Every structure is written in C-alpha cells, then in structure tokens.
Image (cartoon, rainbow, N blue to C red):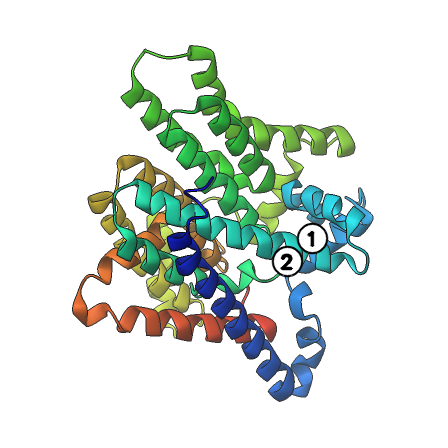
Amino acid sequence: MNKIFSRTAIRAVVPAWLAARLVVGFTMVLVNIFAPEERAEFVRQRFQSWDAGWYRSLLVDGYDLGVAEGFRFFPGYVLLGRAVHVFLPGDAQWSLLLVSNGASLLMLFLLYQLVIGENMGHRLAGRTIWLMAFFPTGFVLVWGYAESLFLVFVIAGLLALRKRNWWGTAALFFAAGLTRPTGVLVVFAVAISLFKAGRRGPWLAKIAALLGAPLGVSAYLWWAYSSTGEPWLPVTVQRTLRGGFVDPFSRLGQGFGDLWDKDPDAFHLVTALIFLALLAVVVKKMPMVYGAYAGSVLLVALAAENINSLERYAMSAFPLVIALAFLMENRRLQRVIPAASLAGLVCLTAAASLGIYVP
C-alpha cells in the first residue's frame, strides 16, 4: 500500500487528476455559455448526461421491471454509490460523482504501480498517467460513469495476478464482472497466467481466479432473470442499442464505406485503426496478458453493428494508453500525442455535453 501511494506516485498522479478535472469542467462551462438554444435542454443535464442519468435513476429508484433498458447497466457502480449515499446527504448524483472521481484517482495510482511493476520505468509511468487522465473520452472518468470503478477492479486484479495472489484476483475480477459485462474478458489474461504458473500451487484458488469475472457477470444475469423471468435480458437489451454481433473485419469494411459516403460515423473507423495500431505496440512491448486483455476488449467493441461508444470501450483497454506512452519515446511524437489527446478531450467533452457525441 505504501508503494502505491509513494511520494513519487503522488507527484505523478495528483496533478494529472486535478488538471483533467479543470479541463473538463472549464469545457463544460464554455459549452453552457455558448450552446445554441436547441441544445440547451441537453446541456443542462451536465454530469447526468447519457448513461450517467441512468445510473442516478437506478441508485434512486432501483431497477424498474417495466423499463427493460435499465437492466443493461450492471450493478457494481450503483451498489457502491448507494452505500456512499447513505452517508452523503443531498442529490444522489453527488454520491455517484464521488465514487467515480475517487475511483479515478485510485485507478491512476494503481496504473502507475502496474507500469512500474512491469519495469517500464518512472518516466513511462508518468506519461501513462497523464495520457489516461487526458484520454479523449476521459470525461467519463469525471462524470457519473462506471468506467473508473471498473478500471480499479481490473488493474488491481492484474496486479494481484502478477503476484499470483489467486484469491485476491478472484475477488477483484468478480467485482469487475459485477460492474461491467466486459469484465469477463479478463479470463484470457488469467488463463495465460495459469498456463505460465504450471501445475504447482493451490488448484482451488487458481480455479477461483479463472472463474471470478464470469461468476460476477453470471450473478447479475441470474438476478435479472429471477426478477424479470427473461433470460439474458441485459444482453438482449444491449443488443437493441448496439445491434447484433458482426464480423469485426466486415464492420471495418463498412467503416470505409461510411468514409466514402462522408458519413459522420466514419470518425469511428479512424479511431478503430489507431487502436489497432496501438494494440500492435502492446503485443510487441508488453507481456502477453495485456495484449490478450486489450485485444479481446477491442475485438468485442468492433464486433457490433453500432460502434458509437468505441472510444470509451477502448479506454477500458488501458494497455492501449500505455502503448501511447511508448510511442512518445519518439521525439517527433512527444508533443503531438499530448496535444492531440488534449484536443480530443476538449472536443469530445463538448460534443457529448451538447448531445452530439455518444460516449
């Protein structure tokens, strides 16, 4: 614990965390001032825009059996927000914002420790922290979204996995699966670690580590089924919004068609190609477990008809951010990447606040 909150880590993490909130907050103030009248109603939602509004509704009213769409949101973030709300008076959104921003701070400390633990150096760790804080969709780490809490569980779980703390890994990945459905994808990283560990060690704890995330996801699916009588309801509801699963290569081909037709969705094709390039860097530069996790997250994100939230899903594949830090070893990119990331954060924060961009 002392290592995670060392003075070096504090100097690297806290300024980045604070600066990102200043940028997001200042951007939202400007949007509020200059937003056109037809966007004013959406802008007034502020931190409750998009999925954040759903999470607040779930915290206050619970899962409404008559509103199926609410079941696509897994309960980990809501449950922790509700626990905080018991002790924090006022509007429920403040409890969710406290959890989201507190988890974001902790996540950055854990990410710093993970990069250092993989012997990548303090300079690369520092760059990774700033790039994560200023990732173009990093505004969801400020808003009432589950991403920051999810990343806490995933990164902490991977730290436990490195130390072969199998029971700790199981508990943290169970929590990740209970927070976001993509948490189940950590099974590939666990499987690789188990293969490398060989037959030695406590087999029961190893099985628990492998099944932790799937059990977390399954626990919520079972509860949703027992409450509604509809099997796979969270999955089927999500499918109505993102479409069914498609061949990701076909989806990329469709993106080229969007580009040719000058469709605004072609933006996601550009970001998809960037993420695939970053995945190649992860595979080349980092241990296999990180490539397996990031690759599976990216593959699932691309295997949908609707990839509007691709950039947010890619942020959850945090090794891609570490890959960006590796690319900054090239002097030509040392200013380009931070500038592009900052510009992306400002633009996407404004676009999401206006209701133009779907995070």
Amino acid beneath label 1: Tyr
| Residue 147 visible in the shown view | no
Q: Which residue in the structure is indicated by mark 2?
A: 144
Q: Which residue is mark 1?
A: 55
Q: Secondary structure at mark 2?
A: loop
Point out residue 174 in the picture as x, y percentages from the top left corner: 55, 31
Task: Using the image, determine if residue 84 lies above or below residue 10.
Answer: above
SS for callout 1: helix
What is the distance, in whole Å, between disc 1 and disc 2 at their CAs? 7 Å
Image side of residue 20 versus residue 86, left or right: left
Classify residue 292 as left or right of residue 45: left
Residue 270 sits above or below residue 290 on the image: below
Residue in front for this viewpoint, 320 or 252: 320
Q: Are marks 1 and 2 in contact (CB under 8 Å)?
A: yes
Residue at 44% from the left image edge and 64% from the top image edge = 16
Circle nearer the viewer, 1 or 2: 2
Quadrant location of residue 299?
top left
Q: Position of residue 125 (x, y in %)?
A: 32, 53
Query: Where residue 44 appears, x then y in whole percent?
Result: 71, 75
For the residue pair 273 and 91, the one nearer the viewer reads as: 91
As displayed, is residue 118 above or below residue 264? Answer: above
Q: Is residue 162 left or right of residue 185?
A: left
Residue type, mark 2 in image: Gly
